[in-house]
Image (cartoon, rainbow, N blue to C red):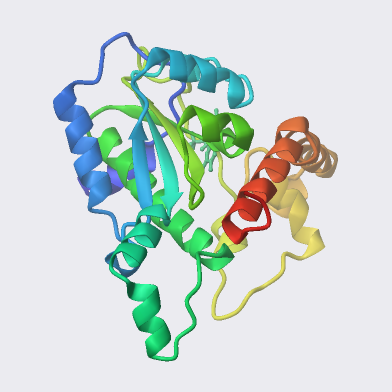
Amino acid sequence: MNQTLRIIHHRRSTRKYAATPITSEEKDAILQAALRAPTAGNMMLYTIIEVEDQALKDRLSVSCDNQPFIASASYVLLFLADYQRWVEAFNWSDAPRLAMEQGLQPRLPQEGDLLLACCDALIAAQTAVIAAESLGIGSCYIGDIMENYEVHREMFRLPRFTFPVTLLCFGKPYAEREHPGLTRRFGRNIIVHRDHYTPVDADAFPAMLSRAGQQSPDEVDVEAARKMAQGIYTRKFVSAFSVEMTRSVKRWMEIWTGAED
Ligand SMILES: Cc1cc2nc3c(=O)[nH]c(=O)nc-3n(C[C@H](O)[C@H](O)[C@H](O)COP(=O)(O)O)c2cc1C
């Protein structure tokens, strides 16, 4: 295994940070790596906000589903999907009028543009994660930044064609690592399909959901697997944060599509 693969295979989300700060050289290296990430049409449809103000971090630790470790992270980056600067550059260059003269219909960014910009922002974010990991700096994503759109819009003065798709907390890991081992993943056969989509057979759910993963079917505790699915449904899918995220993202989409200002 080469060094890059070793870094990828040993990465774990880090939520407990040492007091050692992240240096400005390390921040630069993380940002420079992120900016080299692939980007749709080479348009860089994202913005990265360095959240340096402790008061903002404190507010985020509440607004993002009460996760206090956000406030203790040495470095926090907010990744926005961003079409705003292109909309402004299009107008500045008179592109919509010229397009109309060529028989093309001017338009504003819509759902497809938002998803493409989210791809850009997330690819840049994951590039930052791997760059940080290579410097011995741990990280953790915060998906809850998609919640509470009113709060985050005001906190970061976000214009219409932006969307806060993810937040990343960085810090030197406290002691070694919080958890000695890696988190489990579904078996490769569940995730990697060949040539076409293959639905999971109901008989395969117990093995898929078993704690250890990839057990042989006769070793699997079916009841424990069923409880696991029930737990995920309750804690991750119908729970308050998830319902709030759905509400908040709907509002962002309404803002983009002009259904709401
Ligand atoms: C999109 C996304 C959102 C996440 N949001 C949170 C979060 O809000 N809080 C948190 O503690 N971890 C969050 N995580 C980290 C996951 O919980 C973590 O990646 C997962 O449990 C697997 O653990 P590992 O990264 O250590 O392998 C998020 C990860 C992703 C990819």
Q: Residue furthest bottom?
A: 103
> Where 109 sits versus 224, above or below?
below
- Residue at image x 24%, y 37%? 30
> Where 27 sits versus 130, above or below?
above
Please give left or right for residue 230 compared with residue 16 in the image: right
Across and down, in percent, residue 240 comes to 77, 31
Q: Residue furthest top?
A: 19
- Residue at image x 60%, y 79%? 196
Please give left or right for residue 147 compared with residue 84 in the image: right
Across and down, in percent, residue 87 comes to 40, 61
Q: Residue furthest right?
A: 223
Please give left or right for residue 140 compared with residue 25 in the image: right
- Residue at image x 75%, y 45%? 220
Across and down, in percent, residue 122 comes to 43, 50
Res. 179 visible in picture: yes
Across and down, in percent, residue 99 comes to 38, 82
Report the front residue among 195 and 224. 195
> Where 70 sits versus 164, above or below?
above
Res. 1 visible in picture: no
